[in-house]
Structures are given as C-alpha cells and as structure tokens.
C-alpha cells in the first residue's frame, strides 16, 4: 500500500470455502513479552468480535462496530467482504488497496494486542524481504494524535503506527520499514500459518513502540484498522484472509 498513507487500517479478503476447510488448531505467537505462563492473566480493555454478523449489508454491520470503508474497500468488484464460520473474510479480486478504519478508539494503558485470524490465499510473490510489500491482511495500530512526516511530498503525515500481518517468508518479529513513513511506521510478521489454519497472535505493543521508535513514553491507542494491498502481487492481485477478533490488553 502507499506504506502508511493510512497508518491504521486493516483490509481483509473474502473467499468462499467449505466449512470443513477451516482448521480448528490455534497457535500463539508472542513478541517482546514474557512467556504466557509467567504472566498474570491480562485484562481486556477493548475488543471487537466479528462472530455476530446478523445478515444484511456488510458495510452497515461494520459501521455498528465503529469501522468505515475507505480507499478501495468500498468497491466489491475489487475487494469483496463477507462472513464465514464466525469470521470477517475479504477477497481481493484484482490489484487493490483498501482499508477498513476505526479511528474512534482512545485507549491508554494498553500493553499488548491479541488477534485471532488466518489466511485463505497469500498474495503471490509478496515479500518484504524482496520489497514486494503486499499482504492479504494487515492490522494497523495507531499511537497518539501527533503526525509524523511520511517522507513523500504527496503523502500526508500520520501518527505513529505498527502494522501486523501473517506471511510466507518474512522473518518473524522483524520490524520492517516500507517505502514511506520510515520515521513513524513499522511492519511486523507474526506467523507463517498455512492456508485455513486459524492462529492467535499476541504482540507486546508497549515494548515494540519503545524499541522501534526509541521513545520511553507510549501514546494512547488512537485507531485500529484493517488494510489490504495486492498492487504488486502476481495472479491478478488475488488474495484472501479472515479475522475472528481483536483484543487490546492492559
């Protein structure tokens, strides 16, 4: 995507699949945090669960959860949104850059994020290692309200952000930079699951922010968004992923 043009969004793809193809196994990926057995049970301070789809227009349902569609996500011919087996699913049908944005979140004292999600189809040839910066699903977390320069005259400044995704070949927990937003954005792969394997990834936001941006004080969470970008991918930009829930932990 225009790396951070919208620092906090996550786009999701949608695909039709038989219900028995969705694996039940879960794995946990932790980053920058003590092993789960050594920590107290965390308090969930904010969450969104995509299991309760009642039917009807997807956009209207997402609005009830505080999300809006932007920059390509509004076009179902390019990015098809639907619901399957308790998850929000999105299918990129062509090269697309789209976002599902929630900027109504104002949460301080957040230490970590937990995401339950999976991949249906990875974008062909996508690799931050080879600078093909595409992903089937990215969860963006924005920090604070202060804008950080994009590094490009045509891209507006945005608050600090960290984008989390699942990948095929990137190094796990490596804070990659994109083409822009080098000062204020990082992209981190949390796992290499095969298609249809649901995983739960837990990521230490506080430690990551302090380390990546060399700052002791961590601003409050100001937005969480979903984003998809397949503009540089092969096979006509086709890709798909799904997400069950996102939780912010104290």
Image: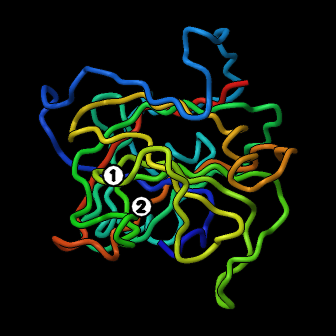
Up-down relation of residue 31 to residue 174 (above or below): above
Residue at left 42%, top 28%?
Answer: 200
Q: Position of residue 2 (x, y in %)?
A: 52, 76
Q: How many marks?
A: 2
Which residue in the protein does label 2 denote?
Answer: 228
Q: Residues within 10 Å of mark 2 (few under 14, many from 20)?
A: many
| Left or right: 101, with 238 as reference point | right
Name the front one of labels 1 and 2. Answer: 2
Q: Quadrant of residue 193?
A: top left
Work out whether residue 19 can be spotted. yes
Q: Position of residue 203 (x, y in %)?
A: 57, 35
Vertically, is 5 above or below 105?
Answer: below
Place of residue 125 in the rendered image (x, y in percent of width and height, measured from the top left): 24, 67
Image quarter of residue 39:
top right
User: Is residue 84 rendered to the left or right of residue 53?
Assistant: left
Q: Are marks 1 and 2 in contact (CB under 8 Å)?
A: yes
Judging by the rendered image, the residue that carries numbered circle 1 is 90
On screen, residue 238 versus residue 65, left or right, reads left
In this rendering, does residue 49 appear at all?
no
The residue lying at 59 percent from left, 55 percent from top is 101
**Residue closest to the far bottom:** 153
Q: Secondary structure at mark 2?
A: strand
Q: Position of residue 32 (x, y in %)?
A: 61, 34
- Visual colour scheme: rainbow
Is 39 placed above or below 94 here?
above
Crowding at mark 1 (Cα within 10 Å: few <14, some 14-19, many 20+): many
The foreground one among 145 and 124 is 124
Residue nearer the viewer, 101 or 192 = 192
Residue found at x 25% / y 54%: 122
Q: Earlier in the sequence, mark 1 or mark 2?
A: 1
Q: Could you tell me which quadrant the C terminus lies in?
A: top right
């Amino acid at each position: 995507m225009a790396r951070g043009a919208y620092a906090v969004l996550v786009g999701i793809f949608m695909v039709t699949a038989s219900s028995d193809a969705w694996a039940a196994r879960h794995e946990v990926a932790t980053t920058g945090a003590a092993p789960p057995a050594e920590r107290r049970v965390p308090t969930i301070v904010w969450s969104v669960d995509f299991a309760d789809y009642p039917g009807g227009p997807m956009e209207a349902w997402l609005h009830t959860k505080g999300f809006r569609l932007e920059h390509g996500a509004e076009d179902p011919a390019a990015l098809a949104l639907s619901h399957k087996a308790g998850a929000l699913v999105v299918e990129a049908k062509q090269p697309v850059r789209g976002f599902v944005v929630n900027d109504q979140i104002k949460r301080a004292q957040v230490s970590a994020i937990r995401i339950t999600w999976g991949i249906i189809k990875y974008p062909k040839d996508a690799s931050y290692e080879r600078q093909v910066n595409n992903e089937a699903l990215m969860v963006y977390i924005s920090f604070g309200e202060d804008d950080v320069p994009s590094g490009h005259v045509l891209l507006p400044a945005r608050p600090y952000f960290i984008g989390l995704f699942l990948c095929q070949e990137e190094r796990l927990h490596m804070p990659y930079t994109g083409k822009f937003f080098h000062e204020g954005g990082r992209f981190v792969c949390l796992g290499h699951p095969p298609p249809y394997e649901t995983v739960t990834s837990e990521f230490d936001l506080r430690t990551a922010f302090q380390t990546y941006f060399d700052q002791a004080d961590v601003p409050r969470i100001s937005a969480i968004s979903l984003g998809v970008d397949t503009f540089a991918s092969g096979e006509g930009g086709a890709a798909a992923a799904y997400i069950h829930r996102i939780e912010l932990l104290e």
